Image (cartoon, rainbow, N blue to C red):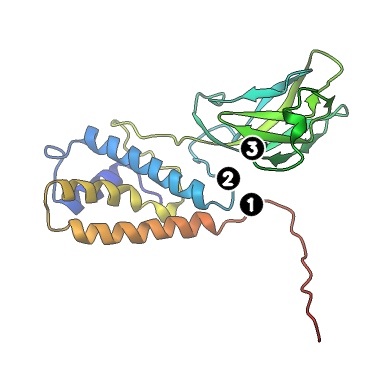
Amino acid sequence: MSLTATQIFDKIDRSCGTTSDKYTTAQKTVDVNLAIDDVYSIALKSRGWNVDDFNHTKEPFITMDLVSGQRDYHFTYDEQSNLILDIERVMVLDSTGVYHTISPVDQQADTDVESFIDGQDSTGLPNRYDKTGNGIFLDPVPATGSVTLTAGLKVFISRQASYFLSTDTTKVAGIDGLCQDYLYLKPAYEFCRDHGLTQADRLYRDLQDSIKKINDRYGSREKDVERRFVPNIESNR
């Protein structure tokens, strides 16, 4: 189930034997938000598909004008000022108004990537990209036939969570409902550990079970990719 802010804070107090006087709501809010970041960190490592907070009101992609002759495009925040954590997919608009997915490459490790760095700046409709830092580099360099192609670049992203405020009561965390026990277990364990409380060991074990569940839930989700049949070749000799 999805837990409201009030329910998470109550679970922390019940696990620690505390009240809002000893473990303030403001302190719990900070610790729960850090736990949300933990869930994202685990999920992004094990994910089978895009990780996003369902509290966000905009879809997890951004568009940008494709500028003729410009190879690099940088992204830090989405249109609602959410920090972008990762780039999942890149699409480019062609002259007929159709978006096409382009392929990711690593210009640091892959072969046949000299065109990114040879200085020739060959132009055309980009068909691949390299992700470096908070941006992407397109190849070939866009040649749109004009100065810009409005919304010619569509980038699917993972972005930071929608965090709790200390005044929130009914808001729920926008993560998988079956992983939300982590949001009270992590703060409760750290509080009990830091204060030498006996329930710290039990909470630690529960926390490890919760981490495994996050890995299982996010890692088992398949990306929306084309399936391929791979022949199994056996020798009868």
Give the numbered dot on residue 108: 3
Name which quarter of the figure residue 167 lies in: top left
**Is residue 149 toward the left or the right of residue 156 in the image?**
right
Disc on res. 114: none
Q: Is residue 17 left or right of residue 80?
A: left
From the viewer's perspective, is residue 50 above or below residue 165? below
Between the C-alphas of marks 1 and 2, the distance is 7 Å
The local crowd at label 3, few if under 14, some if 14 to 19, many if 20 or more residues have their Cα within 10 Å, is few
- Horizontal side, residue 190 vs residue 177: left or right: left
Pointers 1 and 2 in contact (C-beta within 8 Å): yes
The relative height of residue 165 versus residue 226 in the rendered view (above or below) is above
Look at the image and tell me in which quarter the N terminus lies. bottom left
Which residue is label 1 attached to? 223
Residue type at the position of mark 1: Lys
Instruction: Say if mark 3 contacts mark 2, CB within 8 Å.
Output: no
Q: Which residue is mark 2?
A: 50
Q: Where is residue 158, by image quadrant?
A: top right
Q: CA distance from mark 1 to mark 3?
A: 25 Å
Query: Residue drawn at (28%, 42%), measured in percent from left and top?
Result: 6
Which residue is painted at 26% across and 57% down in the image? 204
Query: What is the count of numbered marks?
Result: 3
Q: Amino acid at mark 3?
A: Gln
Relative side of 202 to 82, left or right: left
> Helix, strand or loop at disc 1?
loop
The image shows residue 120 at horizontal and vertical percentages of 80, 23
Give the SS element for disc 2: loop
Point out the residue furthest to the bottom here. Answer: 237
User: Is 139 drawn above or below residue 48 in the view shown?
Assistant: above
Counting residues from the start of the chain, the first of labels 3 and 2 encountered is 2
**How far apart in space, not on screen, are marks 3 and 2 (Cα)?**
24 Å
The foreground one among 137 and 213 is: 137
